[in-house]
Amino acid sequence: MQFTLKVWRQKSQSSKGAIETYHLSDISEDMSFLEMFDVLNDKLIRDKKDPIAFDHDCREGICGMCSMFINGEAHGPGRNVTTCQLHMRSFKDGDTIYVEPWRSSAFPIVKDLTVDRSAFDRIIQSGGYVSVNTSGATQDANAIPIPKEDADSAFDAATCIGCGACVATCKNSSAMLFVSAKVSQLSLLPQGQTEANNRVQRMVNQMDAEGFGNCTNTGACEVECPKGISLTNIARMNREFMKSSVG
Amino acid sequence: MALSGLFLCLFLVGHLLGNLQLFVSGQQGADNFNLYAKFMTTNPIVKVLSYLTYFSIIFHMVDGLILTIQNRRARPKKYVIEKGKANSSWASRNMALLGTILLVFIATHMQNFWYVMHFGEISHYEIKGQNVKDLHHVVMSFFTPTSNSYAAFMVGFYVLSMLALAYHLHHGFVSAFQSLGLNHIKYNKIIEIVGAGFSVVVPLLFASIPLYVFIKHYL
């Protein structure tokens, strides 16, 4: 397969970036999108040029590192897949593919397609945890009966890998889907309920402080999320936030 | 945004029910409408509700403006290619544009009728000992080509504004429930159906009033 790639190149956070064009041929349809980038970078290195910086790690769709905005969609045209799990057979031979970094003032560009997502870490640090006694007298979690529905909903929310596709795809750069998944996975379970009120307040405040936009319920995040995190989590967080503001 | 929006949805229902009286023809219909208009401008409870409505419109507008500015700031650099239609509805992405059209409509609409009723030159007459302003005549002549040379243009403007309202409500109604945390698997479908129905029926009935008055002239 042959492709024309239009990739965003930017030397550093402060420098002005631009789209650059690359031509690739002999790409297998079974290659992942990242493997195609490996081929491109190999070519660039052999030509004594600067390879394209991009985030990646497990390449199994579970680590949340890969982050490319492909042809106007976070993680490209596939549904419920990350960029590393997107294969070249999803494109037509001869296609022109635009690849851009996540764009949000809260995710500053480090280089090329790599962005700094530590804003997410700071949101987690603000309250996305359960304070447990780890001194040895910890109660076995399995000893607490939990309704199957709650356990399933908590687990669904916990599948969020924190890749930031929701922020990247939202026209407002809102982080509501991410934060609501993290709030939900804890508050749905009895261990997380003790700190529920403080957690939602702190995490939402931190989210706002990081400069993410507001949710206008377009639903784009849910569609583009590689893990299919549901909008019901946002409604749950809104409920919890209002409840904790009153009580 | 959600609370003021839902309150304005309630206002729309009330306003529509009152305006549908314009479909009643003859002197009886005109008298009833004028008596209703007098009640709506003098009753103390309605006055409180009307101030609440003005406040909601202004709050909805200012809040929308603040949120839009914050959202623009959150993404200072736009994407070269953005495929919004792959993941969201057109209305959901253009609420600010639709809202701006509606603001222009509200200003025009209030100038056309509310201003005339309150401060303009309007003929009075007596019904059962009550002195009423003939707002019915103002509405009828406004949309009739022989008495208003801009009638066709105004009918077109009113109908297009109601189309904007339909799209605004199509996203706004359901969105308000989600913002208030009232999204739940059990009753999502009901909210969606009621929202879709509301966003079609209410603007359609509103738009039918100027159209009816305009077409009636040719019948």
Image: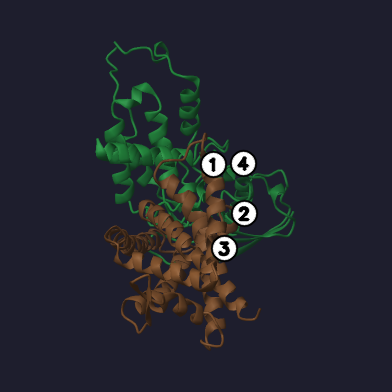
Chain colours: A green, B brown
* Residue position for label 3: B204
What element does badge 4 sit on?
helix
Q: For mark 2, name the chain.
A: A
- If the image is split into quadrants, where does the C terminus of chain A sit? top left
Amino acid marked by disc 4:
Gln
Side (left or right) of A205 relative to A186: left
What element does badge 2 sit on?
helix
Q: For mark 3, name the chain.
A: B
Image disc number at residue A85: 4
Residue at 33% x, 47% y is: A207
Q: Quadrant of residue A199?
A: top left
* Residue position for label 1: B190
Residue B61 x %, y %: 36, 64
Residue at 43% x, 58% y is: B14
Residue at 45% x, 73% y is: B105
Question: How many tags in the picture?
Answer: 4
What element does badge 1 sit on?
helix
